[in-house]
Amino acid sequence: MKNRLQLQLFSLHELTPESAREQIQALSDFGGGVFRPEKCDTAEPVREIFNPADIAEPVRWLSQAGAWFQFKKTKPLRIEGWIRNEHFAPMWTREHKGGPLIPVTPKFPEPKFLTTWTVWFDAKVAKNPGAETLSEFFVQMSQVAKAEYGYLATESDRRKKNLLIVSTESPTTKGEFMTVENVIGDDPSKGVPGLYWLNLFGPEYSRWLGPKLKSIPGMVENLRDESTLVRFCSSPEECESEDVLVRQRESINLLGEHKFFSVDSPTREVEPLFAH
């Protein structure tokens, strides 16, 4: 898809069969099925037919540690994405052939965010069914996922704020240079990645950012679960206008630059909400 919109949600809550069902059902039922998947799978290629009347198998997939529920819709709207169970899948080994299975202890701690959503929309979705429908979907899915952080942005805005492009010398040919692109600063457990068209700060983030959050030059709405929705313009088409970018910079200055990643200062130390 070209000119895409990207939604991301990060939840501290682990996926159980019950919460996996709630989230898949919410995705399917929203707006009478406007974003309902046509196909789903545990990995690419996505080819299993999605049956909204029987989601037992997708629920089983998603309930397993390390598993994905990938989905796709092509008509009349093009949408694709996944919900991911970020728990480490259990690993086992044997000290010798025929010996008993011994659990392997991971070398790294599990991710802070145990449930994540990533959804890509064709930009046409912003006009039909419209920006308000997208905003409502963002809020409802964040609520059902119990998200602590999330955003909905245009791909171009996201790239400008989180894509680092560097020219580096080729490791094989002296004197030749190549361009390397890396998405950086996108892990909310290490600091807020940025401000975008729509921004969701859960209860802990809202308390961490403090009362100044209500004073930023944007549209701020308190949600029923003590989360905060921040919106900087009425539609994603406006999100890269100079007025919006200025207000986002003012908001970051007000809330504390040290809490936000900046692609202009990629090595600057950022204060995370959750210390490891």
Image: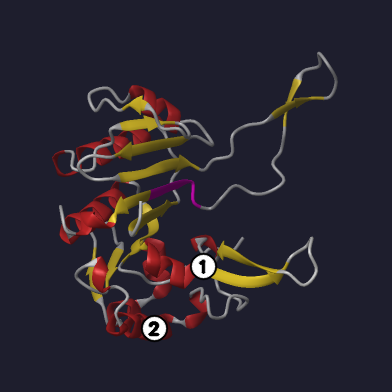
x then y, percent, for residue 108 = 68, 49
Kind of residue at disc 1: Leu
Q: First in sequence: mark 2 or mark 1?
A: 1
Q: The magenta stretch spans which residues? A: 113-118
x then y, percent, for residue 2 = 35, 56
User: Which element is circle 1 on?
Assistant: strand
Residue 53 location, quadrant: top left
Q: Residue at x 62, y 32 (%)?
A: 90
> Circle 2 sits on which residue?
249
User: Which element is circle 2 on?
Assistant: helix
The reply, left or right, for residue 6 in relation to residue 171 is left
- Disc 2 versus disc 1: nearer the observer: 1
The reply, left or right, for residue 104 in relation to residue 238 is right
On residue 163, which mark appears?
1
Q: Residue at x 62, y 72 (%)?
A: 166
Query: Quick check: 250 above or below 137?
Result: below
Report the residue that reaches farthest toward the right. Answer: 96
x then y, percent, for residue 229 = 28, 65
Task: Find out whether residue 157 is within the magenta segment.
Answer: no
